[in-house]
Image: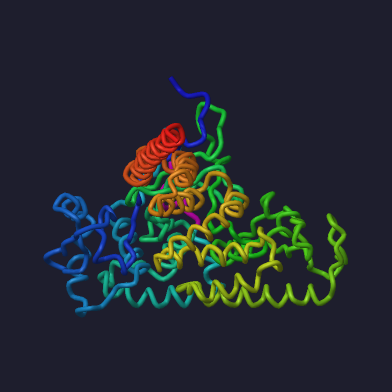
Amino acid sequence: MKKSFHRRGDLILQEKPFACVLQPQYRQQRCDRCFKQGKVLKCSNCLYVRYCNRSCQTEAWPDHKDECAKLKALPAGLVVPAAALMMARIIRRLQQGGDFQKGYYTPKYYRRFHDLMPHEENIRKDAKRMEHFESLSVVLLRLLDEPAIPAGGELLRIYGKMCINSFNIVDNETITIGTGMYLGASILDHSCRPNAVPTFVGDTLQIRLLEDYTGSEVDFGKIYISYIDLLNPADARQSELADRYYFRCECDRCRDEAERKLMNAAACPNADCDEPLDLDGGKLTACPACKTEIKDSRREQFVEISSFTKEQLSKMKDVAYLDVCQLCLKRQKGILHQYNVYYLKTLDHAFECAIDMEKWTEAIGYGLRLVDGFRKFHGQYHPLFGLLLMKVGKMQLYLCQFAEAMKSLHAAEKIVRVTHGDQHDLYRQQLVPLLCDAAREFELAEEAKKGSDSGVEIREIMQ
């Protein structure tokens, strides 16, 4: 019997990749077939790719056998760009009849490789992408026999389809570990207010609902995921989507002027007032809520600190430094509003840096300050929000803050159950054990407290 109603958290699509590739920096830590982390052994012939066991190596062989000799012939120590290896794998798959492979997104409807949009005209006008394409074309000569490489126009279309339709494959920490192309899931459009979320089990893509859905069969024309980081103002999101996917997002969130102002908001000079202030344009002369005057010096200070913060965040795209984050936060205090996204981004960097440096108390403080902002802009159900609460709860448990840990971990459980499902490793093998430990330690602490209180009462009676 068909369901007439789909609940938040329901799995609506699960798909293996048409082609995928592991990021080069994880080759010595993860299996090239299932992406599982752990002990991996090199292919005995090419000595380039690695597998976690014989089963994965056997499953991978039909796809790997043709590339194996090419990888073996490469100079020792040469690392193949992930995009080049991905293109080579797509081309080989197509030559083996892959264009007839169907990626089903419902029991009846599917997509094939030729259904994907190549955006050829956009690619040709994109200088950075064309430069990237030309460099990959040179590398492909080492990975494929020259007669097997499609002619220029067709090769460019394959490149375009790869760029536009691939997913970043992420691990349980939402760190990108690979790239995959999923034919069925390519039907999904973008929204800055998505009603579904992608997560991964190894290289398997799962799409789950973030909202209840009425209907016996899901209409994927009404299902949206986010292609990008949502912790950005509308103009930044629109710019990123235009640069990467060649369209301008005009969803209701991008047209939400109130949110745009909030994401760039200044704090009120009155420390007791939480009103977000829009200082763009110089029109605001007093706080709308408490009527505190907005002086020109205050406006100049806001502009200067905002620019300083953006500059530092730009420098920390690859590596963040706790002392820089602390300097930014010190200067932002009382100037940037608590929902200003650049303040939140600084907090997020500080949170991760403090964890890396094992400064647990500081990290918890940063994490708790992030909660409202993450809920506001990522939404109540988002993997990053669930992971934030889980990390905070784990540190609280380590520091014997058992009641606080229970609260954080229970909140994380409600989110992760929706975003990942209760069978996912993140839920079963990481979150549930933490919850059990927190509950046990909390009960022991409460029993010890009762015993201590009883001892005090007895001494008082005896006296």
Which residue is outermost to the top?
1
Q: Nearer the viewer, residue 250 or 331?
A: 331
Residue placed at 66% from the left, 51% from the top? 251
Image coordinates of residue 390 in percent, x first then y, are 44, 49
Residue 114 forms part of the magenta stretch: yes
- Residue 279 among those drawn in magenta: no
Image: 43 above or below 78: above
| Left or right, residue 114 beside residue 142 | right
- Residue in front for this viewpoint, 103 or 430: 430
Seen in the image, is 463 located left or right of residue 26? right
Looking at the picture, tell me which residue is in the foreground, 120 or 237.
237
Q: Is residue 289 left or right of residue 19?
A: right
| Snapshot quadrant of residue 81 | bottom left
- Residue 162: percent from left, percent from top: 43, 61
In the displayed image of the protein, which residue is found farthest to the front? 463
119 w.r.t. 209: above or below: below
Q: Position of residue 171 (x, y in %)?
A: 37, 55
Q: Residue at x 26, y 66 (%)?
A: 27
> Is residue 425 visible in the rendered structure shown here?
yes
Q: Quadrant of the C terminus?
A: top left
Looking at the image, residue 316 lies above or below residue 200:
below
Q: Which residues are magenta?
A: 110-117
Q: Quadrant of the N terminus?
A: top left
The part of the image, by quadrant, that contains residue 249 is bottom right
Q: Position of residue 342 (x, y in %)?
A: 62, 66
Question: Residue placed at 35% from the left, 68% from the top?
Answer: 82
Count of labels shown?
Answer: 0
**Residue 108 visible:** no
Residue 148 occupies quadrant: bottom left
Name the residue located 27 percent from the left edge and 52 percent from the top edge: 34
